[in-house]
Image: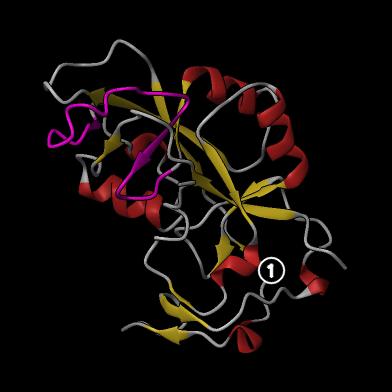
Amino acid sequence: MSFDHVFWGFARLPNHAHLGGISDSDADLNVTYGREVGDAYPSEVSIHVDPTKPDKTILGEVLRNVGCLIIVSRRLKEFLQERDLPDVEYLPLKVYNHKNRLVQKDYFIINPFRPQACLNIPACGFTWRAKPGRDPRYIKQFVVDNSQCTSLPLLFRPEPLFNYVLIHRDLAQAIDAAGFEGNFWIEPHFLDGVSLMGEVINHYRS
């Protein structure tokens, strides 16, 4: 059985901005671990463009950021909403440019909040952080459990890789066909033999 999903990452585009982390640590933690935020989401959550790179000013459809969150424009958010994706939140985010001015364009964090068990955990060869079974530090190889992959949603986080987002290939192709730039679809085998610090998802074309 072939695996029909790829990881959602970011492409480097000329003069596109790189952003820091979001302002609310609790919201950041919840989104990173794929927890539903709901009404607990603060009304004023923000993120800033890296001020040390004043020549990188373009804010496109997808924003590359140090937290490896999926941050998208209103246009892309509405594109996804039209698909009626289950268990996905669209959390509003205020974006400030390198001059600390509020950007007059709406952005949202895409938060799939119901992680799916789809991996063969023993075969993946995880090395764990302080909390075994929750926080993998290293993966030997990406191995799916075919018996758990028969009805996966189009967009989800794989358990226990909570800070990674998987998207169905058909939906990824539809995003590309609609002209949304800045995405980088990463084949799962790219995780083989890497430290799981988010650098794979914060990937970019040279």
Toward the viewer: 25 or 97? 97
Q: What residue is disc 1 on?
A: 118
Quarter containing the N terminus: bottom right
Q: Secondary structure at mark 1?
A: loop
Q: Is residue 202 left or right of residue 130?
A: right
Specify the quadrant of the image occupied by residue 82. top right
Amino acid at circle 1: Cys
What secondary structure do most residues of the magenta stretch adopt? loop
Q: Is residue 146 above or below residue 113?
A: below
Q: Is residue 115 left or right of residue 109?
A: right
Q: Where does residue 103 sit, x and y in percent of width and height?
A: 26, 15
What is the residue that sits farthest to the front in this orientation?
Answer: 206
Q: In this picture, which residue range is highlighted in magenta?
A: 45-69
Q: Where does residue 159 sit, x and y in percent of width and height?
A: 56, 67
Residue for point 64% across, 69% down: 189
Specify the quadrant of the image occupied by residue 145. bottom right
